[in-house]
Amino acid sequence: MLTAGGSLLTASFVHLWQMDQGFRTDHLLTLLFVLPESHYGETRPTFYRQYFEKVRALPGVEAVAGTINLPMTDSEGVTSFEIYGNPTPEAQRPTAAPSTISTQYFKTMEVPIIKGRDFTEDDNVATNPVIIISQSLAKKYFPGVDPIGKKLRPAGMPSEPVWMEIVGVVGDVRLGATQRDIESAMYFPAAQSLHSCCLYTVVRTRLDPLAVEHSIENVVAAMDKDLPITQVSTMDQLIAK
């Protein structure tokens, strides 16, 4: 009875801990490969789309996506941004942690979409620039106002800064392993950035995440045998480092 009670307490603690991070950390595999500019250039979005489709079809895989920054790894920085209709001197502009992601990232990480929509395959270089913001950013800079349809212009983009329409608001995620407070975040669709050379793959599985590693390696090798896969790890292993 004590053992069962202890197990229940442990399970409850793990669930609460995961909720505090803003996403489910279990059953997540992460890995990285780089698409060289010399070979792929503007075809990267097409490669990633086909790659994710193949990985989603693998047995045991529930969802897969890509991100330029993994949460809880202390790899995040911040960038300033402007709010349309609210001109602010550059030194006084607000900041948020930027991240470029693929479609289905929030589904894979189990981050709730609170308002609006997720990115879709239609959010590409041929369509208007869009952005998704975190709940804390929405509350701080759009108090009492629906942020959907509003526009932000982030600095520090690879190309000339442009106004991006807010299409969604998502739950807050703890971005750094040593971060005590939740930080505002903004997300950009990878298909609208031709410079996303190296998206981390995140895979949610129904079984041991490492059990699908070999199958994913085969998918990548079949698409390009010269792409080495590195930094293979479960999310729980990453966080424990």
Image (cartoon, rainbow, N blue to C red):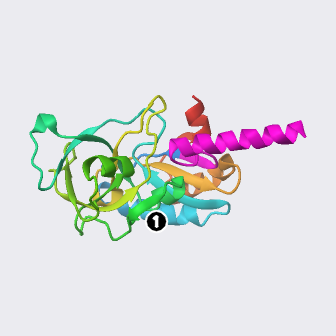
- Where residue 59 sits: x, y (%)? 67, 63
* Picture coordinates of residue 66, whole percent (x, y): 45, 53
Is 183 a magenta residue?
A: no
Estimate the x, y position of residue 159 in percent, counting from the top left: 18, 50
Q: Residue at x 53, y 55 (%)?
A: 110
Question: Which quadrant is home to the C terminus?
Answer: top right
Along the line of sight, the residue nearer the viewer: 141 or 176: 141
User: Relative to the observer, which residue lies in front, 74 or 114?
Assistant: 114
Q: In the displayed image of the protein, which residue is found farthest to the right? A: 1
The residue at the point 41 percent across, 58 percent down is: 102
**Which residue in the protein does label 1 denote?**
50
> Where 241 falls versus 21 (above or below)?
above
Residue 2 belongs to the span the image colors magenta: yes
What residue do we see at 37% from left, 69% from top? 121
| Residue drawn at the location 51% of the way across and 66% of the way down | 53
Q: Amino acid at mark 1?
A: Gln
Against 121, is 143 above or below?
Answer: above
Question: In the shown orientation, is residue 198 left or right of residue 89?
Answer: right
Q: Is residue 144 visible?
A: yes
User: Height in image: 126 above or below 169?
Assistant: below
**Image location (x, y in percent) of residue 155:** 19, 44
- Which quadrant, please, contains the N terminus? top right
Magenta residues? Answer: 1-30
Q: Is residue 50 left or right of residue 165?
A: right
Secondary structure of the residue carrying tag 1 is helix
User: Pointer 1: residues within 10 angstroms few (<14), some, or many (20+)?
Assistant: few
